[in-house]
Image: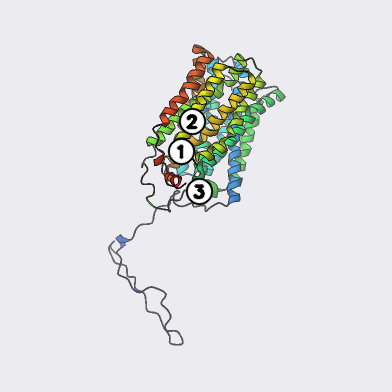
Amino acid sequence: MSDTTPISTSRPPSAPDQAGEHRVPMYPEPMDAIPFDAIPSSPSPSRVKNNPEGKATKLVAAVSFGLLAFTFMLNAMDRQVFPPLLTTIRGEYGFSLQAGGLLATIFTLGMAVAGIPAGFLVEKFSRKTVLVVSIVIYSLGTLATPLASAWGDMALYRIISGLGEGMQAAALFAAVGAFFHSRRGLALGGLGFAFGLGVILGPLLGIQFAGDFGTWRAPFIVFGLLGLVAAVVVAFGVNRKFTEQAISTTEGEGSYEYMPTKAYNRNSLAIAGASACGALTLYGFLGLYPTFLTTQLGVSAGQSALALSFVGFGGLAGLFGGWIGDRVNQRILLIGALIMMSIIGVLIYVVQASFAWQCVFACLMGVFGTGVFFPNTNSAIQRAVRPNQVARAAGLFVTCYYGSAAFSGLLFAALVAKLGWQGAGLLQVTAVPLVAAAIMLIVQTRLFNNAASSAAH
C-alpha cells in the first residue's frame, strides 16, 4: 500500500434488531477518504508536555519537597563546616592563608564543572536518580576529607564533594522549578530557607562535634554518614510524581513564541553573569569571614562560628524573598539586593564594628545574599528560557554561580595580602555587587516565560 492510499471510513449499515427496528448507528456517516500523508504524526514523548508519572497529590508533594529540602540543608552543612575549622586545619597542615582560602571554596569548582552537564543529564534521565547518586557522591567526598595527607588530596576530596553538590543542585532546582512553575520563586525560596538552616547548624554543630571528639575530623565523618542515610531516605521516600513533573504547554501552543528560542540567550546569560558576580562576593565573604573575625577582632573560634551562623539566620528570609520575587519585577528586586550587599560590605570590613554589630551585619548579608539574591537569580534564569529548557537553565546557573565561588576565597586572600582586609573588602564585597547590578540593567523581564501571568496580576 502506498503512502497516499486512501483510508475508507465507511461503516457497515446497522442491522435491524429483533423487533425489526434499526438501532442508532454507532459510527458517523461515511466521510471522504483521508490520505495517509494528511494524518499528523503523534508527538514524541516529552517531559515538557506530559508527565509520565502522573500528578502528585498535595501530601505526596509536601513530603517529597520536605525530604529534598532536608538534603539541601545537609548540603549547606557540609559546605559551611569547613570555614570555622580552617584555622585549626591550617595549623596542622601548615597551609598559608591563600591556600586555606582556596580550600574553603574550592568545592564550588566541582559544582561548576558538574552544573551544565548535570542540566543535560536531568533532561535525559530521571531527576530522582540523579538526586540520589549526587547525594552519595558529595557524602563520600565529605567522608574522605579527614583522610587527606596534604593540600592536594584534600582539595581533590573537596572538589569531589562539590561535584555531587552541583549535580544535586541542578536536579533539585529543575525538579522544584518544574513542579511549582507558577510559584517558582517561593519554592526556590523554600530551598533557600533550608540552606539557611544548614548555614546556621553547620558551623555550630561542627565546632561542637570537634570539641566533643577532640578532633576537627569528627564533623566531616558525622555529616558524611548523615548524607548516605539521606540518600537512602530519598530513594524510598521521594515520589517520582514530584521529581518528574512537567510544565504543561497545552494552555496554548505557541504561547512562548515571543521568547528567544535558545536556552543561552541575552536574558539568561546576563542573569548568569550577575549570579557569578554575586557568588564571588558572597562566597569570598563566607570563606574567610571567620578568619577575619579571629585575626582582626580577636574573637574565639566559637564566636566566629556563631557570627557565621547569623548568615544562616538571614538566609531564612528566602521564603519571603522568593515570595516577593513572584510578585514584583525581579530585575529591580535583584538590583536592590546587590546594592544592599555592597553597603553591608562597607559596614563589615571598613567600619569593623564590634562583635555584636558584626553578627547583625552578617545576618543582613544572609538576608540579601542568600535570602533574596540566591532564590531570585535561580528562578529568574529559569524564567528566561522556554519551559523545555529549564534543566539547561538550572545547569547554567549552577556552573556560573559556583564556578565564580570556587576561586572567591583565593582571590579574597590574595587581595588581603596586598591591600589588607579593608581594601579587599571594598573591592570584592563592595565593588563587585555593583558590577552585578549594572549587568542586571540589560535584563528584559517582558521576555520571561511568566510575563503573561505577571501582567495579569
Look at the picture and state if 217 lies above or below 67: above
Place of residue 48 in the rendered image (x, y in percent of width and height, measured from the top left):
44, 48
Q: Which mark is residue 329?
A: 1
Q: Are marks 1 and 2 in contact (CB under 8 Å)?
A: no
Question: Going by the image, does 428 lie left or right of 237?
Answer: left
Which residue is nearer to you in this view: 447 or 170?
447
Q: What is the number of the mark on residue 249?
A: none
Q: Residue at x 53, y 53 (%)?
A: 55
Image coordinates for residue 297, horizontal then vertical, percent = 62, 15
Q: Is residue 382 visible?
A: yes
Q: Which badge, 2 or 3, is on the more N-terminal residue? A: 3
Residue labelled with disc 3: 245
- Mark 2 — residue? 336
- Distance from the alpha carbon under mark 2 to that under mark 3: 33 Å
Cα separation between marks 1 and 3: 27 Å
Q: Nearer the viewer, mark 1 or mark 3?
A: 1
Identify residue type, mark 2.
Gly
Classify mark 2: helix, strand or loop: helix
Residue 290 drawn above or below residue 165: above
Q: Quarter of the image holding residue 5?
A: bottom left
Q: Position of residue 151 (x, y in %)?
A: 55, 19
Indicate the secondary structure of the residue bearing disc 3.
loop
Which amino acid, by three-letter code, is at mark 3?
Gln
Q: Earlier in the sequence, mark 1 or mark 2?
A: 1
